[in-house]
Image: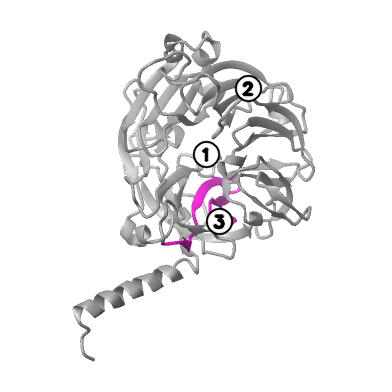
Amino acid sequence: MRPLPIAACLLYCAAATALAAAQEQTQAEASNMALAGYSDLQGRSAYQPVIQQQDGRWIAYIGHHGGAALNPLTGRREANGTSVVDVTDPASPRMLHHIPGASGQGESGGAQMARICAGGSLPHGLPGHYYLLRTYGNEAHEVWDVTAPAAPRRIAQLGGISGTHKNFWECDSGVAYLVSGVPGWRTRRMTQVVDLADPARPRLLRQFGLPGQQPGASGPQPVGLHGPISLGKAGNRVYFGYGVNSDGVLQIVDRRKLLEGPAEPTADNLLAPQVGRLDLGPEIGAHTALPLPAMPMRDGSRRDFVLVVGEAVADHCRETRQMAWMVDVGEEARPRVVSHFTVPEASGDFCRRAGRFGTHSSNESAAAVYYRKVVFLAHFNAGVRAVDIRDPYSMKEIGYYIPAVNARTASQCAGGDPDCRPATQTNNVEIDERGLIYSVDRAGSGMHILRLSEDGKKAAGLPP
């Protein structure tokens, strides 16, 4: 066979690349992880899943980005909100209910954030009851009684805001840290600290943010909040992540000082609870700040860390790579990055695939099965990545699962990009105490319930 001329070869190679791209993800790609079950979530773009053991059943509550879809349970087209799915048998998930959210697209609609507390764990909750804290577009925060998961009822709403995002709810105290846009503040997202010990009667405790964000401040405006995670009363620390893919900030806050200090949002009062801060630089974000206290070290000691995860926002790698950063906070006043994790682009030619490539978030559950041993990272078109963190100075991947494109997967083509192709976009991931992993998709591909294989468990030193 005669070799092709260079020009013809270039055309042929380009066509072959385009064909390979068009065929990508027609099958799932996996290593040391396997599919245990699947729900299509009615084709809705999904954000935060949480899983609650509830009266002998396991129930998944999934928050959705804005949009709308047909709900076969009602026969009506409903604005995306919160899906309630029975995952007791992971091989046969069953949609129990869909709570409609706010109208609008993306983060301007839907009900993207979900948190759950059992009434018996809250200081003034009703034993035997279960409560869902969720966002309602950018308009409000809501509390629902979901004791009967197929028939939830709203019991409280906190409105008067213009932004929401990744809330956190302490079930042991009832304190909730609500990401909000409050009139007068110089940022789209700050923190409302709210007492939800009685979930039907919310009580605002104080407003909080970085100095420079408060009403009346001047000068540069610090980057907005993405989300907090608290260690609760016993741990006495709240970790705030600011920024998306740039100007990221990890802020470490003394919880008691935050709750008991003066509430007026002056610069001094905002700074008083802070015990540590790490500015990550102009091209790194802090979508998630996952605390990993008392990590066992090889010398027998224990040390505190925080895993900071940035969010990729641009298609085809048109930005600085967002990844996971391990931060040593053993000396809180001087936190420092000691290692990082990213997926090698060449391992799957991910920058040529449609959609985003890079991290978005980590699981947040402290379930003992994986806590301080393995984290699961949502990596958009690179799927879920299982990462061994037992040596925090040298994180290593032990498995992954990239879902296949299906009939519900939306095309990805942002910013006028003519290269529009369906691509899965693994958005958020969570685990339960059974060791199951829940991966939800931004592009509407549904929820994949996964298991770590025996080889994966062995690689992480976990029992079979």
Which amino acid type is marked by label 2? Ser
Residues at marks 3 and 2, CA–CA distance in whole angstroms: 32 Å
* Residue 96 can be seen in this image: yes
Q: Residue at x 65, y 42 (%)?
A: 103
- Write down the quadrant of residue 301 in the picture: top left
Which amino acid type is marked by label 1? Glu
Position of 266 relative to 80 (above/below): above
Q: Which residue is mark 3?
A: 450
Expressed as whole percent of the image width and height from the top left, the position of residue 445 reads 57, 58
Nearer the observer, 70 or 239: 70
Estimate how packed mark 2 is, as few (under 14), some (14 to 19) or many (20 or more) residues with alpha carbons within 10 Å.
some
Say left or right for 61 vs 12.
right
N-term-proximal mark, 3 vs 1? 1
Say left or right for 204 vs 210.
right
- Secondary structure at numbered mark 1: loop
Q: Which residue is mark 2?
A: 173
Estimate how packed mark 3 is, as few (under 14), some (14 to 19) or many (20 or more) residues with alpha carbons within 10 Å.
many
- Write down the quadrant of residue 36 in the picture: bottom right
- Write down the quadrant of residue 201 in the picture: top right
Question: Quadrant of the image for the N terminus?
Answer: bottom left
Q: Which residue is mark 1?
A: 364
Expressed as whole percent of the image width and height from the top left, the position of residue 221 reads 39, 23
Colouring style? one colour
N-term-proximal mark, 3 vs 2? 2
Estimate how packed mark 1 is, as few (under 14), some (14 to 19) or many (20 or more) residues with alpha carbons within 10 Å.
some
Residues at marks 1 and 2, CA–CA distance in whole angstroms: 18 Å
| Residue 341 part of the magenta-drawn span | no
Residues at marks 3 and 1, CA–CA distance in whole angstroms: 16 Å
Please give the range of residues in magenta. Answer: 419-447
